[in-house]
Amino acid sequence: MRLVTLSDARLRLALFALLILHPEWGPYVDSQVRELAEPTRTDLQGLYAAAVYLQRLWQTRLGFYLGRFEVLPNLYSSQLGLPAAEERHGKTGLHALSTWQTHRSPYPFNWLASYNKLINLLFEQLKMEAKQHESTSAR
């Protein structure tokens, strides 16, 4: 949970990839959210919502690499005034979330592009791991 308090935005954004890969950590996020002060609490809720939306949007492709996986519960979308995670498989929510985060930030930052870039990096990592596994299994 210390990731969300770091000053480096790239490290904070890495949290959503961790949640996608480890959805079993979802319940711990909710207990941590209650202990955080604003604006860190809302930042963590937004990053968690991003993980929820991205997991829904890329569920088929994630399943290809991860097999069956637990779906993160949608804990914060209604609280943050965002669409349900199931709407258009998370796409509507992801766009709304990026707009919501842009309005909260004092800096010009393209949240949607960052989420797309990071999910692509995650898939590249999963591809590399799958290739390593295949080459190790072939020996």
Image (spheres, rainbow, N blue to C red):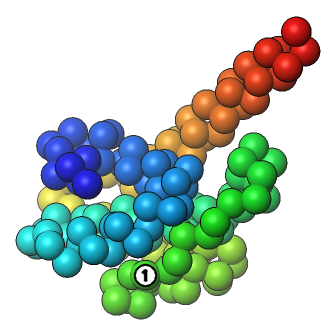
Q: What percent of the width, then of the height, locates residue 80?
A: 34, 84
Q: Is residue 118 above or below residue 63?
A: above
* Residue neighbourhood size for the residue with mark 1, other residues' Cα within 10 Å, grouped as few (<14), some (14–19), many (≥20): some
Q: Is residue 7 above or below residue 107?
A: above
How many badges with numbers are in the image?
A: 1
For residue 39, side relative to residue 95 (left or right): left
**Residue on which the image places disc 1:** 75
Residue 34 visible in rendering: yes
Q: What percent of the width, then of the height, locates residue 36?
A: 14, 69
Q: What percent of the width, then of the height, locates residue 63?
A: 76, 54
| Residue at 27 percent of width and 74 percent of height | 31
| Residue at 34 percent of width and 67 percent of height | 29
Q: What percent of the width, then of the height, locates residue 22?
A: 52, 54
For residue 113, side relative to residue 100 (left or right): right
For residue 134, side relative to residue 7 (left or right): right
| Residue at 52 percent of width and 77 percent of height | 73
Name the quarter where the N terminus is drawn.
bottom left
Q: In front here: 31 or 90?
A: 31
Q: Amino acid at mark 1?
A: Leu
Q: Check the image and name the residue furthest to the left.
A: 37
Q: Check the image and name the residue furthest to the top.
A: 139
Q: Does dot 1 land on a helix, a strand or a loop?
A: loop
| Residue at 39 percent of width and 44 percent of height | 14
For residue 139, side relative to residue 121 (left or right): right
Q: Is residue 52 above or below residue 21?
A: below
Quadrant for residue 82, please give it.
bottom left
Name the quarter where the C terminus is drawn.
top right
Residue 124 visible in rendering: no
Q: In front here: 11 or 130?
A: 130
